[in-house]
Image: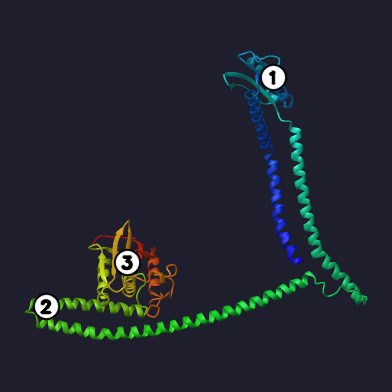
Amino acid sequence: MKRIFKDRFIWVMTPIYLLVICLLVWLIYSLPAIYNQIDTNRVEEIREDITQIIQREEPDDLEEKLADYVAKQPLELAVINEHGFYYATVPTTDFATLDQWVNEAVLSYHSAYTIQKDQEEYQVWLAIYQLEPQNFFEISTFFIFLGIILLFSIVLLLVLMMRKQILHPLKRLRMNILKLKEFRLSEVSPIDKTSAYDRLSVELHEFTDDLQGKMETIGTKYTALEKELQAKNEESIYKEQLVRSVIHDLKTPISIVSLELEQVKEQASLNPALVQKIETIEKRNQGVLTEIKEAILLIHGERVINQCEKIDLVKEVQNTIRRFNPILSKRQIRCIVDVPAELMVYMDVIEVKQLLHNIMSNIAQYTDEKGVFEFTLFEENQSLKMSAYNESADIDAIDFEHVFDLFYQGEVLAKTSTGVGMYTIKKTVQKYQGTCQFSKKENGVELRIEIPLEAVQDE
């Protein structure tokens, strides 16, 4: 308890010491301003007292009251009125002569003014001598001297405490060593009088025990997190292998279908309507083949990163929504899409598809059955802006502050969600120096995305 008290005493006295120094510096620096303020207050008080005496006292007692007041104050005064009242401490009541007679070098205030009392008007000439500086500076010096004594006392207390805590244990250790040399064991200080070193050893031991416990706790938590990440990594590897196998298997039958369509097209050359339908199927089939090739290049790491090209973003939005139509229809979700006729931008087509796919995937999972989904896309001020709103009855279960975190899973679909979709959306948008926000809106939630475009050209 004594050690705790001493430590707290030092921490308390240090700011007090600094505060006293600051007050002394301020006092010395502000002495002229303080003097002027006191003198100004004194002048205002004298003027107010004289005004009250004239307005309060009867004419017969006024001269006596003014004389009593002037006797107590360092001033010169002349008061006259139109009915013959007269009081003056100066040789004349001619105010113009008094203005030339008075020595303004020794005055704090000098003025002539009038005071109304009932139906009478009193003319007052007042000159107030300067405040005696000797008394003021004596008081100021007293407070400065008092502050210096206080600072000296604080320093002295701190020095004595340091001497007791540092020099006294060393002195006791020296005496104990000398006594041990002379085999005066009975005179050696008892072991219960612990030194500063002994207390430091105890504190160090407590610190190491606490640190060891925290390290073991951190190690346990890290091991659990490492196992969880390892499990997710193995699951991701398995899914990647499965997707790679399926994509490779899809390429061959689709290529065969393309060849068969060519043959059917030749045989149906006499039927224009059938030829047109076959060409439409060929076009869609070719689009699927193109996406499969891009997926194969992406899986094998052979695709060039940041391969920006001119694409119609509206068309990509339409294709993505079309792919999710079966799910949206099954859950009876009504889609409201507001997009321009065409919006050409320079972006990485794979990243655009990935961004739109993740947006639609979240919509398909989290929109209430028979709910409403609204998607808006437009270009404004050289920025690409899109918003996706969907109705949801489980808004309270969403942690909006962490929804973009990796592996975040909502409570409702925690088993089916991977916790990667929103994280991927944020990373893709940030790659283009854009911003994304996810917040409540009306009866659901809204995802807002804004991406600055380096170049937007009409085709």
For marks 1 and 2, give the one nearer the viewer: 1
Question: Viewer-proximal residue, 247 or 364?
Answer: 364
The mark found on residue 199 in the picture is none
Identify which residue is drawn at 82% across, 74% down. 192
x and y percent of residue 280 in the render? 16, 76
Gap between marks 3 and 2, in whole Å? 41 Å
Q: In the figure, residue 72 lies in which quadrant?
A: top right
Look at the numbered disc 3 and give the secondary structure of its residue: strand
Q: Answer above or below: position of 129 versus 328.
A: above
Specify which label sits upstream in the sequence, 3 or 2.
Answer: 2
Question: Viewer-proximal residue, 402 or 333?
Answer: 333
Gap between marks 1 and 2, in whole Å? 128 Å
x and y percent of residue 410 in the render? 40, 74
x and y percent of residue 153 in the render? 79, 52
| Three-letter code for the amino acid on which mark 3 is drawn | Tyr
| Three-letter code for the amino acid on which mark 2 is drawn | Val
Q: In the figure, residue 175 lies in which quadrant?
A: bottom right
Q: Answer above or below: position of 264 versus 143.
A: below
For marks 3 and 1, give the one nearer the viewer: 1
x and y percent of residue 363 in the render? 32, 72
For marks 3 and 2, give the one nearer the viewer: 3
Report the residue marked by disc 1: 63
Q: Residues within 10 Å of mark 1 (few under 14, many from 20)?
A: some
The mark found on residue 275 in the picture is 2
Report the residue marked by disc 3: 389
Specify which label sits upstream in the sequence, 3 or 1.
Answer: 1
